[in-house]
Amino acid sequence: MSTAAATATPQPNAQPPVLGVAAYLTVDGAIRASEFYQRALGAKEVARVPVDAKGRTMHVHLHVNNGSVMLSDAYPEHGHSWKEPGGFCLHLQVKNVEAWWKRAVDAGAEVVLPLQVMFWGDRYGQIRDPFGVMWSFGEPVT
């Protein structure tokens, strides 16, 4: 992060994260990821720091399913390099899981675990987005 970026005036559209845990993802293409999440997950972009001369942004804030997900591009020159995501899955407990699933798959998400009824009573499945992030969807079977 440059000194100018670190001391920049807060953006007028800056939003605090909603309560609870907020995922902050480093992705290869934060602006493209935001656009994908808007199409695939119904995300609403609530803040964005303008891109730098290399086309990177240090911050995008999204609201997804009443929670916050934040994105950043990698800045290896400042010790913040990109690594392929692994070892975690972001879960969305939703109403109408079929609609959420179809929207994500139609937008280009890869099916990892097909949507199915699981032993704990949820209809559940997993996808991987084009940025390598795993997402799961669940809804109790009624």
Image: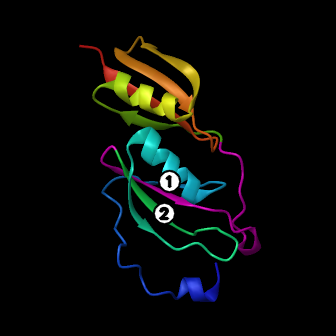
How far separated are the C-alphas under marks 1 and 2? 7 Å
In the picture provided, is 15 more to the left or to the right than 72? Answer: left
Q: Residue furthest right?
A: 77
The percent position of residue 4, horizontal first and vertical second, equals 59, 88
Give SS at disc 1. Answer: helix
Residue 8 within the magenta-colored segment of the rendering: no
Tell me if mark 2 has few (under 14), some (14-19) or many (20+) residues whose alpha carbon lies within 10 angstroms of its own. many
The percent position of residue 113, horizontal first and vertical second, equals 55, 20
Residue under pointer 1: 34
Region rendered in magenta: 65-85
The percent position of residue 36, horizontal first and vertical second, equals 51, 46
Q: Is residue 52 above or below residue 116?
A: below
Classify the position of the N terminus by image quarter: bottom right
Residue type at mark 2: give it: Val
Residue under pointer 2: 60
Residue 71 within the magenta-colored segment of the rendering: yes
Query: Which residue is pictured at 65% across the width and 68% down the height?
Result: 55
